[in-house]
Image: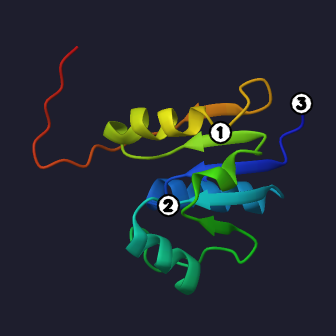
Amino acid sequence: MTIQRVAVLGGGAWGTALALTCARAGRNVTLWEYEPGNAASLEKKRESRFLPGVRVDNEIKVTRDLGDTANSDAILVVVPAQAVRSVVTSLASLVSVLRSRILTASASVRSARMNMSC
């Protein structure tokens, strides 16, 4: 399977950096952002509020519609760890698991109080 269309879910610093890396590797990239203010910054200023000074390539499509990511060959889930379940649950009804590869690259937890139990 050739991976040409890549969706990155999460427009924070890590998601934006991965979207840029994929685009610069010649992939068609859609960057999905949940937070309206950051999505507007990504679309209009071509910059993530979480990665100031780094310009988002014009070839990267920015969206707030999760459905825009459904036809991707690979989907990188790069949302805060506590949001992974809800995002993937929403995504599940939109994508074909036989067609899309879904990878998670979540690295942060945004919470005033962190409670981790194993």
Task: Tell me the kind of residue under disc 2.
Answer: Glu
User: How crowded is the residue under tag 2: few (<14 C-alpha within 10 Å), some, or many (20+)?
Assistant: many
Mark 2, secondary structure of its residue: loop
Cα distance in 3D space between marks 1 and 2: 16 Å
On the image, the x and y values in percent for residue 99 come to 80, 30
Q: Nearer the viewer, residue 60 or 97?
A: 97
Q: Of the two numbered discs 3 and 1 on the same chain, state the one appearing first in sequence.
A: 3
Residue drawn at (39%, 64%) of the image: 35
Q: Nearer the viewer, residue 61 or 47?
A: 61
Q: Quadrant of residue 74?
A: top right
**Marks 3 and 1 close (CB-CB < 8 Å):** no
Q: Which residue is mark 1?
A: 94
User: How crowded is the residue under tag 1: few (<14 C-alpha within 10 Å), some, or many (20+)?
Assistant: some
Q: Nearer the viewer, residue 20 or 96?
A: 96
Q: Which residue is mark 2?
A: 33
Q: Nearer the viewer, mark 3 or mark 1?
A: 1
Q: Is residue 28 above or below residue 38?
A: above
On the image, the x and y values in percent for residue 25 come to 79, 56
| Residue 35 shown left or right of residue 20 in the figure | left
Task: Tell me the kind of residue under disc 1.
Answer: Leu
Q: Of the two numbered discs 2 and 3 on the same chain, state the one appearing first in sequence.
A: 3
Q: Which residue is mark 3?
A: 1
| Residue 76 shown left or right of residue 50 in the figure | right
Name the mark on residue 80: none
Q: Nearer the viewer, residue 88 or 38?
A: 88
Q: Is residue 32 above or below residue 76?
A: below
On the image, the x and y values in percent for residue 17 come to 56, 59
Q: Residue furthest bottom?
A: 45
| Residue 111 shown left or right of residue 102 in the figure | left
Mark 3, secondary structure of its residue: loop
Mark 1, secondary structure of its residue: loop
